[in-house]
Image (cartoon, helix red, strand yellow):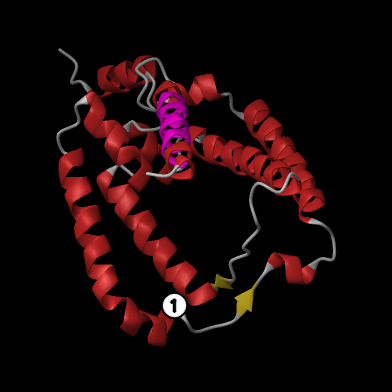
Amino acid sequence: MSSSVVVAILTGLMMGVVFGIALEKSRVFEPGMIVGQMQLRNFIMLKIFLTAVATGALVLAVLNGFGFVKLQPKAALYAADIVGGVLLGAGIALAGACPGTTLAQIGVGYRDALFTLAGGLFGAVTFSYAQTWLDKVLIGTGPRLIFTDLVSIPYWQGAIGLSAAIALILVLMERLRSWRDDLGTDCDGNNVEADEQLTQRAAPAE
């Protein structure tokens, strides 16, 4: 095994450990948190994803600037993106998990996450067999959009602008509704005290 492969494997493992710790500490892997985001009851998941986009853009700009990575812009395919987004969103709402959180749920003991993982693997295999047909009727059709074709600025400038805009949005979102309010005291996207009050109101008077 070459040294470059070993470095790539070790780097991937370290990044996975950091990602896993951040995922667990943020509680975004909790089914209640995920479903709460899909129902627009809390926005911690959105805040985490926006933060990841901003930091990822900056890190990619730095790595590209030093020549460690080469940019490979991917065209937006509206038909495929819309259909795929709807299917993915429906699956996340029903399962209370997304591909990145399923393994974390298994790790902390959610047994139903095993079925989510099995369904994801089955879907991946099914897609591999259907990809040729989908390329003709959906994935490979429709208009293409590459952001770098629309603006004549270096990637690093666009990355800084995007990150600054996302940072502003995050600050406004946090001021309107703190992550502590969304997290709740039972760490699943609901507030224990509010749940108890609703239960007491719903209970019949003796």
Rendered image quadrant of residue 171: top right
Q: Is residue 192 above or below residue 36?
A: above
Q: Is residue 9 above or below residue 125?
A: above
For badge 1, the amino acid type reads Ile
Residue 24 in the magenta stretch? The answer is no
- The residue sitting at 58% across, 24% down in the picture is 178
- The residue sitting at 16% across, 41% down in the picture is 114
Rendered image quadrant of residue 175: top right
Rendering coords of residue 195 (x, y %): 32, 21
What residue is disc 1 on? 139
Between 136 and 18, which is closer to the camera in this rendering?
Answer: 18
Asked if residue 170 lies left or right of residue 48, the reply is: right
Q: Which residues are magenta?
A: 8-23
Rendering coords of residue 77 (x, y %): 53, 74
- In what element is the residue under mark 1? helix
Q: Is residue 96 visible?
A: yes
